Image: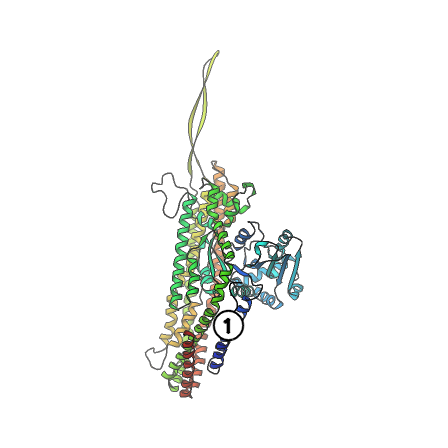
Amino acid sequence: MAVFTEDNKEFQTFIDNTNAIITEVTGHAKKEDISELQRLVSNFKKKTEDFYRTDRMLNIGVIGQVKAGKSTFLNTLLFDGKEVLPKAPTPKTATLTKMEYSDKNIIQIEYYSKEEWEVLEENACVDLEDEIYTSAREIIEMVRRNGVDPVPYLEKGKDILEYESYDALVSGLNNYVGEDGKYTPIVKAVTLYLNKEEFKGLSIVDTPGLNDPIASRTIRTKEFMEVCDVVFFLSPSTGFLDKSDWILLSSQLPQKGVKKLVLIASRYDSGVRDVLRKQEEDDIFGDDENTTDNVPKACRIVKKKLTKRAKAKVEEFVEDLEARESSPELIEVIRQCAKPIMISSLAYNMIGKAESEFTKEEKNMYSAIRQFSTDMDSDLNLLGNFDEVKALFREVVTEKEHIFEAKAKGFIPDAVEELRNLLLSYQDKTNQRIKLLEGNEKEQLLEQKKLIESQMNNIKADIAAVFGELNAKIESEKAVGIRELRDSSKDYLNIRERTGSKTSTGSYTTGHLFWKKTHVYTYEEHYSYCIAADAIENLKKYALEASNQVEEVFSEAMQMKEVKRKLLNVVVNNFDMGSEKYDSSLFRIMVEETISRIEFPVFDMDISDAMSGIAGKFNGELTSAQEKTELSTALSKAISNIYGELCDRLEKEVKSFETKMSAISQKVEESLLNNITEEFGNLISQCENKENEIAAYKEYAAILEKKLAELKA
């Protein structure tokens, strides 16, 4: 880090100034506000101390949900496509893995602590389908199945294993992070120290994702992201930037200090396969704008679609940041996501390999793409598109010093903005307090409190009615959804019969006993046939339509604006909103916060095994009645399995959702009754010495105003 040096004086000035603010507001501010300011100072110290370590490396994080393809991405980027980092198909195996350089090949394993394991065991006993509990059950079951006694490992906390060679380390790694690794379920994090020159100066982390259901791993991920410099964010092409991804990218991702944010549309081949179709012989309209029969055009269609979505989401977010007067540096980092890079690690790893060397997954993809390709090598290069990522990675490593310099320059501005936002929030709360006290006498507040207490039972009954009606609607929509799932499945059972022709040769003989002549002739024979690709296409279309139908069950039942309106009507119907005796603003904020906590489940069907089963069993043109029947039966069975799985998941999700709604209903009651009663109690108490209380709040507001002006200057 020769291009800059630590300015201890400037950092210490910020710390001293912030501590001075803490001292000045103590006695005015709430305890939790003081704690927030103290955390800001503590985090600032940790970040700057970490950054200016003599052995500080460039921290690169790879983030994305489970099944975003993070491990395959890193294997392609760092290990020439070799499966060094095992795939993590379920949350239970999504271990945080860090990679750094060392002259020795070492695996450092961090196990769960005894306290963390106790939480997992408690969660495993909860009979709910939330991912927090299902993952805990899977982990506990995996430990039992593997015959591992976790206690000795939990007690020692860490293991450091040294290997004679890099290859030996790779073969030993699966035991600790592999899907079926013996110790995988008790491992929280792994650090690989690799004797490979390309890792020098870098610390690369494959994260479980910030939506990890295991809380302790989420905390560890966030700790790393706080000091991260570069982020590669992976979102699958088939569900690009869905709700969960966007929450991860825009809300949960700690953006402080990240100077390079690269958005990757992973599994590009899956997105492309969704728009490929064979043109019908009698199709007078040709290709439509959303489908095609060749890979290059399919790539253009998908790239245009994904880029348009990324640009729209980024612009919407930037507008919000600008409205909140966020720093130009943060806005610039977010703008980097407007041009995603489309990649298929799978396709890239297939380039140059013989078909006999393909893995099962690669064979499946090859079979699906081949019928739309005239040049597979060229199309695999187009789908892989990984050279762009490798060039970007090399550029990031080369620009390491510039990234560090930008980060160093951003420490004070970022910290000042964070401090400013905290003080603004305290100022807003203080001004609200002043307004409430100035607008209400003790007698008015007592009357409002009395009104609330007299209406409590009515409020509870009305809240129960709102959520009871909601649950009834969910059940009704569930029945409709199941019926529509069953009805729509019939539309995909019939496999199109194609027509082919072949030229055959026949012969006949003329002449008599002593002289004969054989005549040869050709004729065209027409026949009908089916192909597996059409069955697979039906399967994909049904899975997509069925998943959408299931999600509509919740979106149709839960009209958010309508639920909000009904809950606010609970307040309106129980109180005279025009009365000077009643202040409705206390309720409206709580209702808004309650509604914002409601989330819909997302359904994503993995039908790769079913597709592979059909592709592997049926090849070429199927002409016999038996072959056609067998293909039809296989398709029917696969669709039936999808229908059954979705119905089961819908049933479980509805039950889970109703449980959540019950908890939220209880929370609404607490928010609208208990918290408000406490609020009134505080206000009434303050009204006993109203003038002094208002004067104290105004003094606090003046201090905040002064400090904000100083920060702005």
The furthest residue to the left: 578
Compared to 137, does 687 lie above or below? below
Q: Quadrant of residue 138?
A: bottom right
Q: Residue furthest top?
A: 514
- Residue 505 appears at what percent x and percent y? 45, 25
Disc 1, SS: helix
Q: Horizontal placement of 569 versus 395: left or right?
A: left
- The quadrant of the image that shows the C terminus is bottom left
Tell me which amino acid carries mark 1: Phe
* Vertical order, 561 against 269 (above or below): below
> Which residue is at the front of the view, 686 or 554?
686
Give the image quarter of residue 191: bottom right
Q: Residue 710: x percent and y percent? A: 42, 77
Quarter of the image with the N terminus in it:
bottom right
Q: Residue at x 40, y 49 (%)?
A: 301
Residue 247 visible in this rendered orientation of the protein = yes
13 relative to 290 in the view: left or right: right
Residue 32 in view of the camera? no
Q: Quadrant of residue 296?
A: top left
Which x, y percent locates residue 653? 48, 61
| Numbered-mark total | 1
Point 40% across, 59% down: residue: 313
Estimate how packed mark 1 is, as few (under 14), some (14 to 19) or many (20 or more) residues with alpha carbons within 10 Å: some
Q: How is the image coloured?
A: rainbow
Q: Which residue is mark 1?
A: 11
The residue lying toward the viewer, choosing from 552 and 324, is 324
Percent coordinates x, y for residue 225 in the rendering: 52, 64
